[in-house]
Amino acid sequence: MKVRVRYAPSPTGYQHIGGLRTALFNYLYAKASGGDFILRIEDTDRSRYFDGALQDIFDTFNWLGIDYDEGPNKPGANEPYFQSERLELYNKYAHELVDKGWAYKCYCDSERLAKLKEEQEKNKQSFGYDRHCRDLSAEEIAKLDAAGTKYVIRFKAPLEGKTSFDDKILGHIEVENNTLQDFILLKSDGFPTYHLANIVDDHLMGITHVLRAQEWIPSTPNHILLYKAFGWEHPEFCHLPMVMGQDGQKLSKRHGATQVMEFRKNGYLPEAIINFIALLGWSLDDSTEMFSLAELSKVFDIARINKSPAVFNYDKLKWFNGVYIRQKSDEELLDLVLPYFVQRGLVGENVSADERAYLLRLIPLLKERIELLSDAPDIVEWAFGELPPYKAWEAIYPKKVEPAAVVRILNDEYDILSNLDKESDEDLQHKIYELAAKYEVKAGAVFMPLRIALTGTNKSPELFPVMHVLGLDKVLARIKAAIAKIESEQS
Ligand code: GLU
Ligand code: ZN
């Protein structure tokens, strides 16, 4: 039997980490088992729908390289893939259940339901429809229909017994039927509820496995009952572990970014996101950490999905990002960080060939030092135009070194650099190093002030690559400027 799985988002908000994890696990399971991955848009809740949410689904998939075999804009045997375009089907199936006695029309108006709720509240009863219309006589129904009374279609939940299923991940789950509601299948406006549309489509689209978040477990008994009522076999259910913040609470905005596109904006690479998300509740073994999407597409297996909650560790994600950044070629990385340079105003939108060549020289200087693409401008800001305001002025005075001594050191360095005669970097380094002995200070006290003088920050790349990028004239001018700044502060 060919595996067929689906991701069935409701376009009511932007894609977040939890949804992406569901999408990815479905995608990977399909790929690894030679099956099909279907994207189905569950857009029947029109009050919560918005266009941006739909576009965000496509953007997320495009960015991460997740492709579907069937879905919007992809002709397939099960079109259309928007539930809002399948309303007739749901109507037909809802009425079929009424005809078979598995469902009934409920004519209760909102006024009656509100009153009911009020009463239940007063009596401290749990909320629920009181099954008022479950046993209306044929005459009563005919009368109400003749009068054109609006109705919803409700499922006739069994009043006794148990409903159970064997979750592929969590094992046997069962509920007492007397805890279930006569839940709505079709609303009075002809739109289906999630329950009806979801199982009609899963059936018609030949879905074999439902991988979705654990928060859907309470809905599953309803779905099992619906499958039974229709006489259909139900797919396997695999409820995925919760995603928690490091404090053990459900992941939310409080913990940091949760929307997929926020991560993109903040400078994460798709490779890092994929790798990290794949490990939210799944592992290959106890040690392998690095996976590309292609590798995951071969080795992913639902047997290795955890029961227990997954923890979203932002530091770990950053670490992954750094690793993937360092795997990029300089050219690739330049293209990736360029938008952040533009955003910072370091370069314009249109980069000339000369500018690009210059930018390319900066990439090796920042590659080892950034974890996010968005960190890049900070590391090399000194390489553009005038030196930006010092970010680490105090650090120019190393521990226990007087400002006057720093001035002397910088002056000596100025002299060394202005009298260069084809020395190698090593020779030069040695000459500067000798100043430490001359002034009886640590090596850091001769190198760090120079680095800050040239870049305005102590977080800059190594000294020599910086000097090569700046060129001697700028180097000398910046040393002079630093000396002047120290002196003006002291006077
Ligand atoms: N439309 C539901 C959602 O937004 C689908 C849940 C399911 O996979 O059954 O998550
Ligand atoms: Zn009713």
Image (spheres, rainbow, N blue to C red):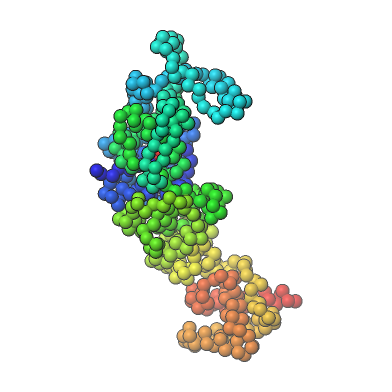
- State the image coordinates of residue 108 (x, y, percent, origin top left): 50, 18
Residue 354 sits in quarter: bottom left
The residue most toward the front is 161
Q: Residue at x 28, y 50 (%)?
A: 33
- State the image coordinates of residue 221 (x, y, percent, origin top left): 41, 35
Q: Is residue 191 above or below residue 356?
A: above
Q: Residue at x 68, y 81 (%)?
A: 400
Q: In the rendered image, which quarter contains the C terminus?
A: bottom right
Nearer to the camera, 481 or 229? 229
The residue most toward the right is 491
Nearer to the camera, 127 or 51? 127
Q: Is residue 337 above or below residue 365?
A: above
Q: Is residue 51 left or right of residue 87?
A: right
- State the image coordinates of residue 372 (x, y, percent, origin top left): 49, 61
Residue 97 sits in quarter: top left
Is residue 305 something one can see in this rendering? yes
- State the image coordinates of residue 408 (x, y, percent, origin top left): 65, 84
Q: In the rendered image, which quarter contains the N terminus?
A: top left
Q: Residue at x 54, y 52 (%)?
A: 248
Q: Is residue 374 left or right of residue 202?
A: right
Nearer to the camera, 298 or 104? 104
The residue most toward the left is 1
Q: Residue at x 26, y 49 (%)?
A: 34
